Image (spheres, helix red, strand yellow):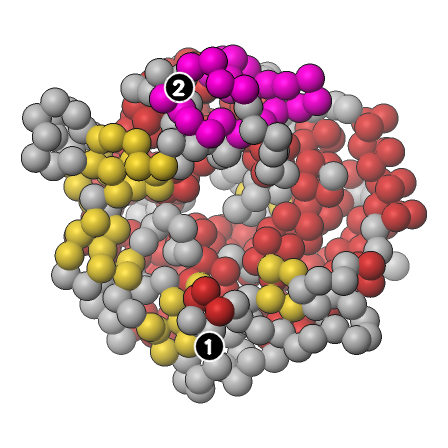
C-alpha cells in the first residue's frame, strides 16, 4: 500500500489516498515486523514511498512515519566500515543485530549500499537530523575513493563491508542485478543537491565511460546496442530487463551535462540511451506475448537471432517504461508513447486478473493464466510510468524540480525545496 500511495495521488484518486493515509496513521507499526528486513528494499519501497507521498501531499503523518522508520534503519550502518549491512530488525527491542545474508558470502551488494542516499538525504532535509544524510553519503565517499583505485570506473557487485577499509570481492561487473541502481544514484544525488556537488557527477561520468569502454556491445545481425556483464576479462553476453533503466539514465545525464547537450560526452550518452531504448522495446516486441523476459542472452555468432530468452518470466517490471517516459519527456518523440502503448496492451492481455495483475511465467507461451503474484513495484513504478507517459502534462518536472528514486517515488530536489540544511518543520 505504501509503495503505491504517490501513484494514487498522481492519478487524482484522492479519496483512496486519504484512506491510505489513515491506514498509515492507525495501522503501520514497525514494531510489529518480527522478521529482519532488507535495508535496500525497505528504504526504496517504504521510506521512499512515505517521503514521495509526503512531498506531493504535505500530509505530516507520512513524514512522522518516515522519520520513525529512518531511525530504525540507521542500525544497519553500524558496521566497521560504515557501509551498511543488508538486513536489520525494525523492532525497538529484542531484534537481532544487523547482518549480511549467507548467499552473498556475508558481503554487501553494490546496489544495496549505493541506493539509500536519495531517501536519507531527503529525510535529513525534512527533519533537520544530519545523521541520516551523513551516514548514507559517507558510503559514496567510500565508493568514490575505491573508484580512484580502479581502472574503468566500474565496481564489482560484492563489497566486504565488515573490513576497514572495505574491499571488493571478486571481479563480476554488472549493470543489472546487484549493481544497477548504485550507478543511477551517483547521477541522481548530484541532481538532488542542485547540481553543486561535482564529486557525485564525476563518479557517474567515470562509470558511464567504463560502461562504454568495457560493456557496450552490438548484436548480430541487427546491430542492437546492449550492455554485457563482465567476469574478470571475460564478457557474458546477457542483459537483464533491469538494465533497461540505463537508456533513460543516460538521456537524463546527457540533458544535465555540465558542458551542455552538445558536448561530445552528452551526444554519445544520448545516442546510446536511445539505442538502448530500442533494444529494450525489441525484447518485448519479439516475444509471442509481447512481454519481455527477465533477461536475454545475446548470441554473437547466430546470424538469425540477436538474442534468445534466458529466463522466460515477466514479473511486471518497469525499467523499459521508465526509459520510454524519460526519453519522451526529454525529446517529445511520440514513438516512446507508441512503444509504451504496445507494452501496456501486452500486460492487459497476459497479466490482468479480476483482482489485479499477475506475473507471466512464460513470455513465449500465449494463453497462459497469470501467476498469483504481483510485486508492489507494479503499482509504484510500472503503472506510474505508463500513466505519466500516456497522460497529459503533470506536475512532475524531471529537469528542474523532482528526482525519482529507484522505486519511482518522486522527491523534491534541493533547488526546489531549499537548502539541504533546513531546520525541522514545526
Q: Is residue 332 left or right of residue 373?
A: left
Residue 269 shows up from this direction:
no
> Residue at left 61%, top 79%?
78
Q: How many marks?
A: 2
Give the mark nearest the N terminus, 1 or 2. Answer: 1
> Residue at left 68%, top 50%?
46
Residue 313: x, y in percent? 43, 32
Residue 38: x, y in percent? 60, 60
Query: What label sits on residue 365 in the rendered view?
Result: 2
Q: Which residue is mark 1?
A: 161
Q: Quadrant of residue 343?
A: top left
Dot 1 and dot 2 residues touching (CB under 8 Å): no
Start and end of the magenta stretch? 344-369
Answer whether residue 356 is magenta in the image.
Answer: yes
Residue 395: x, y in percent? 64, 29
Q: Quadrant of residue 98?
A: bottom right
Amino acid at each position: 500500500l505504501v509503495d503505491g500511495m504517490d501513484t494514487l495521488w498522481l492519478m487524482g484518486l484522492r479519496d483512496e489516498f486519504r484512506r491510505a493515509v489513515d491506514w498509515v496513521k492507525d495501522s503501520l507499526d514497525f514494531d510489529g515486523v518480527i522478521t529482519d528486513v532488507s535495508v535496500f528494499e525497505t528504504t526504496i519501497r517504504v521510506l521512499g514511498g512515505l517521503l514521495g507521498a509526503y512531498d506531493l501531499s504535505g500530509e505530516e503523518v507520512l513524514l512522522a512515519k518516515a522519520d520513525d522508520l529512518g531511525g530504525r534503519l540507521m542500525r544497519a550502518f553500524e558496521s566497521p566500515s560504515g557501509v551498511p549491512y543488508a538486513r536489520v530488525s525494525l523492532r525497538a527491542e529484542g531484534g537481532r543485530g544487523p547482518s549480511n545474508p549467507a548467499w552473498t558470502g556475508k558481503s554487501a551488494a553494490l546496489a544495496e549500499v549505493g541506493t539509500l542516499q536519495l531517501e536519507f538525504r531527503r529525510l535529513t532535509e525534512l527533519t533537520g537530523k544530519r545523521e541520516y544524510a551523513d551516514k548514507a553519503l559517507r558510503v559514496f565517499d567510500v565508493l568514490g575513493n575505491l573508484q580512484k583505485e580502479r581502472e574503468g570506473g566500474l565496481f564489482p557487485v560484492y563489497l566486504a563491508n565488515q573490513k576497514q577499509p572495505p574491499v571488493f570481492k571478486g571481479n563480476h561487473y554488472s549493470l543489472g542485478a546487484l549493481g544497477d541502481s548504485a550507478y543511477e544514484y551517483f547521477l541522481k544525488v548530484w541532481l538532488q543537491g542542485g547540481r553543486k556537488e561535482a564529486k557525485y557527477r564525476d563518479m557517474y561520468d567515470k562509470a558511464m565511460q567504463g560502461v562504454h569502454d568495457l560493456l557496450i556491445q552490438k548484436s548480430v545481425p541487427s546491430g542492437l546496442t546492449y550492455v554485457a556483464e563482465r567476469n574478470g576479462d571475460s564478457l557474458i553476453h546477457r542483459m537483464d530487463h533491469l538494465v533497461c533503466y540505463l537508456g533513460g539514465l543516460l538521456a537524463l545525464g546527457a540533458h544535465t551535462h555540465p558542458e551542455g547537450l552538445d558536448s561530445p560526452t552528452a551526444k554519445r550518452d544520448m545516442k546510446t540511451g536511445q539505442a538502448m531504448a530500442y533494444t529494450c522495446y525489441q525484447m518485448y516486441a519479439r516475444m509471442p506475448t509481447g512481454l519481455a523476459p527477465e533477461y536475454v542472452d545475446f548470441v554473437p555468432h547466430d546470424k538469425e537471432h540477436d538474442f534468445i530468452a534466458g529466463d522466460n518470466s515477466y514479473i511486471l517490471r518497469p525499467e523499459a517504461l521508465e526509459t520510454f517516459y524519460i526519453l519522451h519527456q526529454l525529446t517529445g518523440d511520440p514513438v516512446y508513447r507508441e512503444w509504451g502503448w504496445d507494452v501496456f496492451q501486452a500486460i492487459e492481455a497476459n497479466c490482468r486478473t479480476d483482482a489485479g495483475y499477475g506475473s507471466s511465467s512464460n513470455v513465449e507461451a500465449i494463453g497462459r493464466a497469470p501467476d498469483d503474484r504481483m510485486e508492489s513495484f507494479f503499482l509504484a513504478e510500472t503503472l506510474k510510468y505508463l500513466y505519466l507517459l500516456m497522460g497529459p502534462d503533470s506536475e512532475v518536472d524531471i529537469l528542474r524540480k523532482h528526482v525519482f528514486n529507484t522505486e519511482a517515488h518522486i522527491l523534491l530536489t534541493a533547488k526546489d525545496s531549499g537548502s539541504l540544511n533546513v531546520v525541522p518543520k514545526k
